[in-house]
Image (spheres, rainbow, N blue to C red):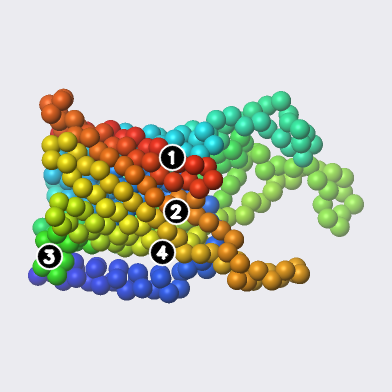
């Protein structure tokens, strides 16, 4: 009885938070968050994410909704994926999960290979002759469990590391999610909620923030000072969605309330090919970002659209079941995701389970 009441309270609380997010969170802090690599989709199976918050399972669920990890029927799940991001940036994702009593536990790592960049400074704007390699990585752990046969909860803890030459920042981001199957007595109807990327602001530090300057209002000679970098918030989002299966097809919808960007509506239609895999198509559309009040200029842009989400558009994907060829529980996923003026991204993922 206590678990049943807890399940109801969690779902009701998240539903109320969802409405609050929609009413008060839209574009209120547009463009003021960093560490947006937390929002980059690392896997291929669920395309742009329509319904994923409600039905993603196993290691695919770690990004979309950690509660889905508990719905895996395997003792061990593993995934490796590669995303060809824009501007020759590569995003790699690796993770593995296992059972731990009544819990499912997972670890994963996401890395971004940006390549070398020529170093420039105030004194050497054309370059110093040196290069540096930006470092972006996310190390995550996940813990999930079933509250009942139909309800699961999960928590992610992500260690974020960013570095540019001689400056770096470190922080922690947390995700919490719930999935529920059989809503309103409909076995094929699944819902999910996820709070993602909440945590303390991050701040850069390091020797690279040192500058030679003259103190304002002082007769002291030029000296070495360290710049106090501003802190930045994490890109907090609230996902809520549903998935319904009918006539062999999976229909999914997710609404993402973004506190630091435009809100997003994501749709998905997938169809299973018995013994072979599945195919799917998705679409994402974002609310128009309106330019906020301008002070100190002669232009009135209050009603002018000024931002387009590059992830908006149509995505395609397919999964190939390799079990009949390998004798193992193995599959390959492939997806093509829109990226605005940068064309499309391709994601390839290999999933193995035991």
Q: Are marks 1 and 3 in contact (CB under 8 Å)?
A: no
Number of callouts in the render? 4
Question: Would residue 149 be found to the left or right of residue 161 on screen?
Answer: left
**Marks 3 and 4, how far apart at CA:** 26 Å
Q: CA distance from mark 2 to mark 1?
A: 12 Å
- From this view, report whether residue 188 is shown above or below residue 272: below
x, y percentage for residue 319? 25, 38
Residue at disc 3, secondary structure: loop
* Residue in the image at 40% along x and 37% along y: 346
Q: Are marks 2 and 3 in contact (CB under 8 Å)?
A: no
Place residue 232 in its image quadrant: bottom right
Comes first in the chain, label 2 or label 3: 3
Mark 1 lies on a secondary structure that is strand
Alpha carbon distance from label 2 to label 3:
31 Å
Residue highlighted by disc 3? 186
In the rendered image, is residue 44 in sight?
no
Pick whichever of labels 1 and 3 is earlier in the sequence.
3
Task: Give x and y (percent) for residue 12.
Answer: 25, 72
Report x, y in % for residue 351: 25, 35
**Percent x, y of residue 273:** 17, 41
Confirm or deny contact between disc 1 and disc 4 (CB under 8 A).
no
Mark closer to the chain start, 4 or 2: 4
State which tag comes first along the sequence, 3 or 4.
Answer: 3
Residue bearing mark 4: 257
Q: Nearer the viewer, mark 3 or mark 4?
A: 3
Q: Are marks 2 and 1 in contact (CB under 8 Å)?
A: no
Spatial separation of the CA atoms under disc 1 and disc 4: 23 Å
Location of mark 2 (residue): 312
Q: How would you rate the neighbour count of disc 3 (Cα within 10 Å): few for under 14, some for 14-19, many for 20 or more?
A: few
Give the numbered dot on residue 345: 1
Front: mark 4 or 2: 2
């Amino acid at each position: 009885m206590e678990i049943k009441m807890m399940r109801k309270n969690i779902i009701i609380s998240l539903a109320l938070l969802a409405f609050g997010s929609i009413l008060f969170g839209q574009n209120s802090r547009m463009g003021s968050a960093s560490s947006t690599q937390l929002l980059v989709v690392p896997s291929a199976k669920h395309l742009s994410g329509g319904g994923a918050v409600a039905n993603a399972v196993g290691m695919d669920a770690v990004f979309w909704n950690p509660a889905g990890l508990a719905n895996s029927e395997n003792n061990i799940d593993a995934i490796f994926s590669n995303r060809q991001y824009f501007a020759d940036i590569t995003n790699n994702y690796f993770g593995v999960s296992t059972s731990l009593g009544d819990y499912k536990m997972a670890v994963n790592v996401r890395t971004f290979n940006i390549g070398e960049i020529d170093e420039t400074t105030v004194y050497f704007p054309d370059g110093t002759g040196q290069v540096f390699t930006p470092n972006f990585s996310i190390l995550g752990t996940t813990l999930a469990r079933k509250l009942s046969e139909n309800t699961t909860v999960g928590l992610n803890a992500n260690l974020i590391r960013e570095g540019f030459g001689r400056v770096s920042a470190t922080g922690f981001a947390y995700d919490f999610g719930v999935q529920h199957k059989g809503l309103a007595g409909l076995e094929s109807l699944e819902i999910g909620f996820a709070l993602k990327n909440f945590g303390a602001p991050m701040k850069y530090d390091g020797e690279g923030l040192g500058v030679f300057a003259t103190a304002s209002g002082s007769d002291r000679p030029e000296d070495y000072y360290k710049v106090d970098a501003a802190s930045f918030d994490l890109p907090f989002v609230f996902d809520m969605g549903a998935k319904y299966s009918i006539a062999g097809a999976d229909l999914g919808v997710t609404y993402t309330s973004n506190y630091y960007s435009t809100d997003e509506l994501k749709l998905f239609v997938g169809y299973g090919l018995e013994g072979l895999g599945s195919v799917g198509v998705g679409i994402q559309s974002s609310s128009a970002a309106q330019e906020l009040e301008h002070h100190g200029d002669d232009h009135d842009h209050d009603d002018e659209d000024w931002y387009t989400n590059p992830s908006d558009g149509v995505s395609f994907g397919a999964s190939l079941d390799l079990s009949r060829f390998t004798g193992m529980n193995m599959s390959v996923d492939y997806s093509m995701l829109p990226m605005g003026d940068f064309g499309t991204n391709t994601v390839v993922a290999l999933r193995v389970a035991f």
